[in-house]
Amino acid sequence: MDEENLIAKKEVLRETDISYGQLYRWKRKGLIPEAWFVRKSTFTGQETFFPRDKILERIGRIKAMKDTLPLDDLADAITQQVTAKVQVAVEQLRRATWFDEAAVRECGVDLRGARSMSIADALCVAVVGKLRALARAEEQGLVQRTIRQHLDESFLERVAESDLHLHLLRKKVAAGGISAEISVVAVAPLTVLFDPDVQRVGTVDLRNTLERIKLDLVSGTGGSCGGAASGNREEER
Amino acid sequence: MSEERKSASLSGAGKLSGGDYARVSISGAGKVAGNLKAEALSISGAGKVEGNVEATQVSVSGGASFGGSVTADEMSVSGAARIHGEARVKELKCSGTFRVGQSIVAEYVKVSGHIHVEKNLEAEIFKASGAFTIAGLLSADRIEVRLGGRCAAGEIGGEKIEILRGGFRERGILLDGLVRMFSGSGVAELKVGTVEGDDIALEETTADVVRGKRIRLGPGCTVESVEYSESFDAHPSAKVTKKTKTD
């Protein structure tokens, strides 16, 4: 998939108009995951490449948010060890692009009167929301139940650290003139292989989704992280 | 049990079990079994901590060995220290010998002795006048090096990178002797794979690739490939195999 679509570091700098200093700083802060740095030998020597869509999207976000939010708050949001207990303010979620009332209902989250929901619920809503256009109602239920069944703190940590995707699959089986289609949900790395009869309906990058939720959260808070000021750090304008 | 944390002091040969302390000082041959949490840890004899250390202040003037990781606001090493795990220290000053088995993550690092890191060294400001070996990436907003021995790094990246010949003396630090001790035959040079930054000034450096906006190569540089986007100039004695202007 887009793993093949790589962009060289110097191209990233040119396209996004950021400096080496910024890129290295954001890497140090954990705003750009280590896994995105792909080393390759080229005729000019060692060069670093990135997955094009991911890096451009991420840098765009950081650039858009860095003026209103201290870099450290941004970094905390992405790198922080999430716990299933973290509560997410509902009004902020409503503003996020992936938020979808129907997905909320599908996930069985009751928002009436609730001011916050857990990160786990938010992840469930986001994933179901992303697949809603592609998946049938019962498949959405299946996706929802899969996430629910596995969602605990260690699962969230694994999502944050590894390349897990949620795959929605369909397979047709025919025997004796009767055919049926079965739906399957799998959580596996993007590189997982299936038999040729399996049709991929949709794939959701779980880590990316989780990071987006967290980014949307910080961008909504306006950076009111209270007294723990980061001192006289030289923040880039 | 009172809520107040105790202080412990080991002088002579002693052993301390881990735990939460106010101050721990080891001046003989002391050993701490397990993880240690303390406001201040000072080791001036031969100290060993088997677990992880979490402290506001750590100072080593003798020989210290840490089996786990060290997290501290301030750490100073003027003797010899070895950390098998990671060092997460806001402010790190090293005028002795310091070996770290994993990475150093810091805000400010000042090295006038010798530092050896098996993985990466990340900081906001990195100043060195001694010698260093960093197997992975040395990354900081500002990197200021006055070469004081054989230095090596896998990669260097940051905003402003300045690697110059040594000969600068810090106020009040017994620098010269130490530098001579650790630098071997008085060679002061840097060997590095790739250097990337916005403003780069190098002397006595051998590199495969130097990439940046503004690049200045001084005497003693040998660079395989230079890629610059704004300006480039080189001392007559600098050897550059290939240079490219990118836009």
Image (cartoon, coloured by chain):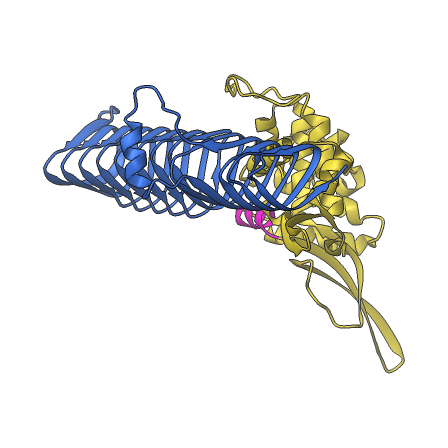
| Front residue of B132 and A110 | B132
Q: Do we see residue A163 in this rendering?
A: yes
x and y percentages locating residue A98 in the rendered image: 77, 38
Q: Is residue A32 above or below residue A112?
A: below
- Give residue A107's quadrant in the image: top right
Which hue is chain B drawn in?
blue
Q: In the shown orientation, is residue B228 left or right of residue B147?
A: right
Q: Residue furthest right?
A: A177
Q: Quadrant of the N terminus of chain B?
A: top left
- Give residue A171's quadrant in the image: bottom right
Q: Look at 50% across and 18% down and name the residue there.
A: A231
x and y percentages locating residue B189 in the rendered image: 44, 41
Q: In the shown orientation, is residue A88 left or right of residue B39?
A: right
Q: Is residue A170 above or below residue B110?
A: below
Which hue is chain A drawn in?
yellow
Main SS, magenta region, reads helix
x and y percentages locating residue A48 in the rendered image: 65, 48
| Front residue of B233 and B50 | B233
Does the magenta-highlighted stretch encompass residue A136?
no
Q: Do we see residue A77 in this rendering?
A: no
Q: Quadrant of the C terminus of chain B?
A: top right
